[in-house]
Amino acid sequence: MQGVKLPVTVKCEINVLLIAVTVLGLLTRLYGIQFPTSVVFDEVYYGQFVSLYMKRVFFIDESGPPLGHMILALGGYLGDFDGNFVWNRIGAEYTSNVPVWTLRLIPALCGSLCVPLGYLLMVELGYSHFTALGASLLLLMENSLIVQSRFMLLESVLIFFLLLAVVSYLRFHKAPKSSLWRWLWLFLSGASCAFAVGVKYMGLFTYLLLLGLAAVHTWHVIGDKTLSNGKVLVQVVVRFLVLVVMPAVLYLGFFYVHLILLYRSGPHDQMMSSAFQASLEGGLSRITQGQPLEVAFGSQVTLRSASSKPLPCWLHSHKANYPIRYENGRGSSHQQQVTCYPFKDVNNWWIIKDPSRQSLVVSSPPRPVRHGDIIQLLHGMTSRFLNTHDVAAPMSPHSQEVSGYIDFNVSMPAQNLWRVDITNRESDRDVWKTILSEVRLIHVNTSAVLKLSGASLPDWGFRQLEVVGDKIYKGYQQSGVWNVEEHRYGRSHEQKERELELKSPTHDDISRNLTFMAKFIELQWKMLTVRNEESEHKYSSLPLEWITMDTNIAYWLHPSSNAQIHLIGNSVIWTLANLALFVYVLLFLTYLLRRRRKIEDIPEACWEQLVLAGVVCSGGWIVNYLPFFLMEKTLFLYHYLPALTFQILQIPVVVEHLYTHVLRSPSQQKAFGGVILAALCSVYFCYRTFSPLTYGKPELTSEELAALRWRESWDILFRKR
Amino acid sequence: MEDSCGEGSCTQSQSCTTVRSRKPCMDTEKYREKGCSKKPETRRAARVSSTDTQGFNGTSSEKRLCKRENQLRSDSDHTPLCPLLSVAALSLCTRFYRITEPPHVCWDETHFGKMGSYYINRTFFFDVHPPLGKMLIGLAGYLTGYDGTFPFIKPGDKYEHHNYWGMRGFCAVLGSCLPPFAFLVVLELSHSTPAALITASLLIFDTGFITLSQYILLDPILMFFIMGAVLSMVRFNRQRLRPFSWSWWLWLLLTGVNLSGSLGVKFVGLFIILLVGINTAWDLWRLLGDLHLSLVDFMKHLIARIFSLIMLPLFLYTTIFAVHFVILNRSGPGDGFFSSAFQSRLIGNNLHSASMPEYLAYGSIITLKNLRIAGGYLHSHWHLYPEGVGAHQQQVTAYLHKDNNNLWLVKRPNSDDFTELIRHGDIIRLEHKETTRNLHSHLHEAPLTKKHLQVTGYGINGTGDPNDLWQVEVCGGKKGDPVKVLRSKVRFLHRSTGCVLYSSGKTLPKWGWEQVEVTCSPYLKETPNSQWNIEDHINPKLPNISLHVLKPSFLEILLESHIVMIRGNSGLKPKDNEVNSKPWHWPINYQGLRFSGVNETEYRVYLLGNPVIWWLNLFSLGLFVVMVSLCSVALQRGAKLEGTRKAHCQVLMEGGGLLFLGWLLHYLPFYTMGRILYYHHYFPAMLFSSMLTGISLDTFLQNADLLFSPAISKRILRGGQIVLLVGILYSFYLFHPLSYGMSGPLAHDPTSSMAGLRWLDSWEF
């Protein structure tokens, strides 16, 4: 009878525990997530992207890859969000069309599932179910994880994928060598790594840790002399494919979906190249669709600088001359200014003229301009030729001034011949193509290159950007490369007609598409290189402050009462985690040194288990924490949460090790059990104490709030009555 | 046979000191190697196997082993003298050839030459690098009769009658030590003379190393110490069987000395410290695992290393700074970078032996210095903010020079009672001495930092409004603490808006005379930008005390100068519009540096590595990785390797591994650096890369018999060596004008002497 009953009950017990912690996780994270119905902290940031997804409008966000935003947008999609909400202020009330519950649902679900994942991780590391229960309870009662999960933020999603990746890899590693299921676990691990990296770049470091672990395990496989060479090769190749190639492909996939979803032009268009913009519906393509592809003599064009530093801009000229003398006493040619102008303007139009002919219209058939051809560029509105000469440029005196020249002035000869140098040509007779060709304009007399210097002109130049001729131009510089963005074949012979023609929009219909890879590379590069200006923030903090939680973040304050939500962790857990890490390092070093002297305190298997647990937990903490010291961006306490999760998991590992291996006598073990119980109780107490700040309810009085300010450095808000 | 060969080559040595007889000498070398290749190799194998088994043998066999090892050692101690001498001679020749050309200041000579002069003149200056390199340059100049009078204003200035050759020659001597050192290191690691010769010829004939060694720069000095440390380290590693012998101590201490030298020249020296540290940790780990060694002996080992590799370098490093501070005791251009307390040490500075009241009181006239590095003095003048920039009131800025407009009068609000000391928490008004305007802030945005509030001068002759009130706060103080002149860090909190007086470090446009912006920041984090100290203090009612007592201690000075250096380093940010050198440019020799001359008419020197050598190095790095992977996979799979093959594996994995690690440590960190980077930062890594090339190419050629029959493989070995040598020499012949100077048309011109040699568009010669 008992022989039948026992396995059943044991099985049930595991399930019940796991289910119980899952349910508790769901309760703590999902309970009342639609409160408050106003914008909480960084929701104001992510929300705008969700709206843009809903409207299918293209954007660039340099903070992370698109998967995270897409996951949040999925919540909006499930709630039929139309994207109509102005995300401009923390604390703004949501309008009724914003599905607050579904928007916050997915991060909350991910956050809840971290609790059972912590449980599973402990089991996979070979620890007892008691320990696993302890781990999941600690994660359950960590206030900061709860707060971060309950809103439309990405950290909980990241943590979820990180834990999933580690758990499934350990499953794979422990599974019997013969089973085919294990490959499924490996597959899941690779996929979660890709998802984690896709949510935030920070996921990369845990991915590298996991790769390192996998490399060591693979190295053991290679050293396994019972396996044939062929089998070893298969093992190595499969692991490589699943853990390296597949995540890379998935990562590309995220961008693919991202670009499929966002096909409309939007506010960030101008950061991208013309070709990229032309691929978006509505933006540049509305203007450029159907432009003639081949630039011909007589073409009217706008020339866009390939460099977007400091701003994307177009070659421009206007009816104002360089001042005769600059402030510093240097002289100029006093000819018409040529600048680069960051806005669309009729003065951005230039006409390409054949120096040997007078005609300013495109002949029929058009004579295309090819690589190496000599051209003149005539400014459409003022009929000045683009000219450069040996006069120092206004802001960059090492380079030549570029001016608009007309033959009134006998004192200076015209030097207005330019050679077309197509840098991305395939052959030496390539035709200059709209948008696609990147062109350098090389001055024939001085071999200076037309270039955006990066400086802006002072008031006399209307603060537009300076354009110069660079004689010592070297290598490939984006600032010296231009492309034709808007283009039409000129038809008017008279200046008046021409001005009208220039003012009219371009038309015709053909569309040009970039390949996905080209778009991906451009977008990814832009995301990695675009830097927002270093911004100070009231709640920004330094990595060193995170360990001791010397800082907090106020997420939300009720507009009229003292109810507020803060990112504040469970102090007891943070202390325990620091302690556990310290004890672990101590234990590890002691064992390591003693083992080197052939003194074996614990059995080999136990040692290996301890090392593996250390690699996962302490290693996870290290790789998610230390990189922040090298980062120069504005940092917040929530950046520490992935590291904290791993650090918390270190607590039960150390506790179980101390309990089973260090404390030998039963009385000590009993006492230690008591300590553990007491610690758990104080964790619960701390969780309860801070839950008003975690959930935003109930409202506390000023005295109660003051009592919660356990640290001087915490910034808790008091409403003046 | 070995001996006779050695003799043979030594008799050659008399005639092979000149450059021209290099080839015959090399050929004999080859001959020697070929003739006796069998014997050394088998010996190497024996040596390897003996070290392999050494861990497992009992004490009884130790003696026998030692004896055998000693015998082996005495053989390998036989450093081939002829090649070494010719390497040294050749490197001296290549480095000293036309060393006085061009007779004008080149590139960074303008900095380091100037700093050498400062040492001779004993004027204080500031630099982002530690002082040893510049001190040595100064010493070399001093000893060769340079009087420190040349101003080194800008590159291109003619030296004329000034003695500059001494400083250049000193750098060149140190630079010439690199090839022989590398030769010895590779010989030590691979026990193969051809490998060592490959390395040495790479370094001798690299135009980059030659150029970098010929001028007054820190790099030859830095690399000398780096190579010195590597050499002593590998020599020390070899002494492991004779612990605590005098040679063991010698090399250990030398390693420590070289470490302090390299750190004393540039902070890049940290990387070599890291390499030595890793090597030492590995060595200690091995010793710890040796159960025949008692723990007491192990502790002896540990303490010996802690003493020689940590305590000794630390001591020497501090000594360098002590000497630096003792020598530079006069006020100079570096004063402004340092705090007021620091300045009081310098003869000629107005804080030197100045006396003033110690505690701030009402009625005092003061100057306030911002605690940010190179933070200015709080300043105001009659000019107003222009229309459209906040309120149209008087400007308040931070100014880096001493000026009467920096003086402020501390007043009690609404009263002229001038007696009491000012304490933490007091409310004060600051009146500008010259214009009698009050320091004022209000809810207008600041001119540049838009999130901050504008600070102006407002009111006149003692009138004002509540926006002129500031609360004094001593950092780290509590209510009632008095405010100390020079020593206290003070913040000024604006009474009505709660913001704090702040200097952003941004330069104002023309209307603000390009002085530094001062704002009132609503973010109350304690940063040096919002902290000020009181530098000048005039109050006739209070007794003046001498500031000698306030002089900072040596450790404080040391700490401060390090903080200033580190901040100065991270402050060297690349400017947006300049083309910056990126770490990935370096190994591919993408772009060099102009040392001298731009135009066709000028004498041009261009720092660029010999592309053949650099690309060979790049290729060898790949080759090394492939070979090591093959080796280790084969070993891991338990492949049975015969004697020589196993020895080669070991050389690759141990010697090569050490050098590869050195390369990584000297290269990868640059990717994480935010400061501006230059091409010449790669040269220390390049040293390791060249040594690695010697080992990997030699091993590669020697293992040709894996694919070919022994006869052919021998021919391949010899052919390969000859091709390498000829290639290096010919490429040096082609590119030598880069180092020794070019004039005439630039390379894109077909009439130029360098025509056709501009293989990459990015090269600028």
Image (cartoon, helix red, strand yellow):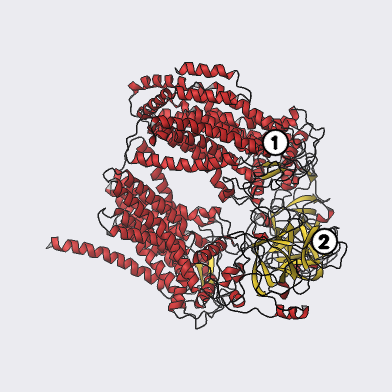
Amino acid type, label 2: Asp
Question: Which residue does the numbered mark 2 point to in the structure image?
Answer: B416
Q: Hey, which quadrant is residue B218 in on the image?
A: top right
- Which chain hosts label 2? B
Of residue A327 and residue A473, the one placed in the foreground of this image is A473
Amino acid type, label 1: Tyr
> Mark 2 or mark 1: which comes first in sequence?
2
Instruction: Judge from the rendering whether residue B380 lies leftward or rightward of residue B736; answer left or right.
Output: right
Residue at position x 44%, y 56% in the image: A206
Q: Residues within 10 Å of mark 1 (few under 14, many from 20)?
A: many
Numbered disc 1: secondary structure: helix
Q: Position of residue B538 (x, y in %)?
A: 81, 51
In contact (CB < 8 Å): disc 2 and disc 1:
no
| Tag shown at residue A408 | none
Q: Hey, which residue is sitting farthest bottom in the picture?
A: A96
Question: Which residue does the numbered mark 1 point to in the structure image?
Answer: B740
Q: Position of residue A622 (x, y in %)?
A: 46, 52
Residue at position x 82%, y 61% in the image: B416
Real-space Cα distance between discs 2 and 1? 73 Å
- Position above or below: A360 against B428: below
- Nearer to us of marks 2 and 1 is 1
Q: Does residue B743 appear anywhere in the picture? A: yes
Q: Does residue A617 appear anywhere in the picture? A: no
Q: Hey, which quadrant is residue B197 in on the image?
A: top right
Q: Where is the C terminus of chain B found, in terms of image quarters? A: top right
